[in-house]
């Protein structure tokens, strides 16, 4: 069995994880992970890289906590995070509010390989659907 720290900025999400049996949880930001430098072999980031305002800073922070030879497993939306049907409904709502529907890193994710390289994180696989 593997032991791993879980980090989330949301106290409510951490409480939900504890109720499901997760241990070794810490509240923290992806831009300032509460982990020592080089302290983990694996970082898993599922559908979250499109959210942080400072994506290059978050990738640098992930690099900081990874041990030499460590890995980042990340999932990101191939196009956009929302299904087309959901998008249609929300675009109308956001337009009525005078706002644009987007994730902060929609445009940056198109340059993800370059961002990873600048953070010294080397991709070993890309399962992008064609």
Image (cartoon, rainbow, N blue to C red):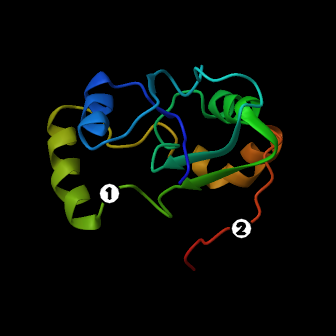
Reply above or below: 89 against 55: below
**Residue in the picture at 74% in, 46% down:** 116
Q: Is residue 28 left or right of residue 11?
A: right
**Residue in the picture at 31% in, 42% down:** 21
Q: Is residue 130 left or right of residue 72?
A: left
Residue nearest the observer in this picture, 3 or 28? 3
Residue nearest the observer in this picture, 31 or 85? 31
**Residue in the picture at 68% in, 28% down:** 61
- The residue that mark 1 highlights is 82
Q: Is residue 2 left or right of residue 122?
A: left
Which quarter of the rendered picture does the C terminus lie within?
Answer: bottom right
The reply to whether discs 1 and 2 touch (Cβ–Cβ < 8 Å) is: no
**Quadrant position of residue 13:** top left
Q: Residues within 10 Å of mark 2 (few under 14, many from 20)?
A: few
| Rendering coords of residue 104 (x, y %) | 47, 36
| Rendering coords of residue 117 (x, y %) | 81, 46
Residue nearest the observer in this picture, 4 or 119? 4
Residue nearest the observer in this picture, 120 or 37? 37
From the viewer's perspective, is the residue at label 1 or at label 2 nearer?
A: 2
- The residue that mark 2 highlights is 125
Q: CA distance from mark 1 to mark 2?
A: 24 Å
Under circle 1, the secondary element is loop
Badge count: 2
| Rendering coords of residue 96 (x, y %) | 14, 37
Under circle 2, the secondary element is loop
Give the mark nearest the N terminus, 1 or 2: 1
| Rendering coords of residue 124 (x, y %) | 77, 63
Reply above or below: 36 against 130: above
Which residue is most to the bottom?
130
Q: Residues within 10 Å of mark 1 (few under 14, many from 20)?
A: few
């Amino acid at each position: 069995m593997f032991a791993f720290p879980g980090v989330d900025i949301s106290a409510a999400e951490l409480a939900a994880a504890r109720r499901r049996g997760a241990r070794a949880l810490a509240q923290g930001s992806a831009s300032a992970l509460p982990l020592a430098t080089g302290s983990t072999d694996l970082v898993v980031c599922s559908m979250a890289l499109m959210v942080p305002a400072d994506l290059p800073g978050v990738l640098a922070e992930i690099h900081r906590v990874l041990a030499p030879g460590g890995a980042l497993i990340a999932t990101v939306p191939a196009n956009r995070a929302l299904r087309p049907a959901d998008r249609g409904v929300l675009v109308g709502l956001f337009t009525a509010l005078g706002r644009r529907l987007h994730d902060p890193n929609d445009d940056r994710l198109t340059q993800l390989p370059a961002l990873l390289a600048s953070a010294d994180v080397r991709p070993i696989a890309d399962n992008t659907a064609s």
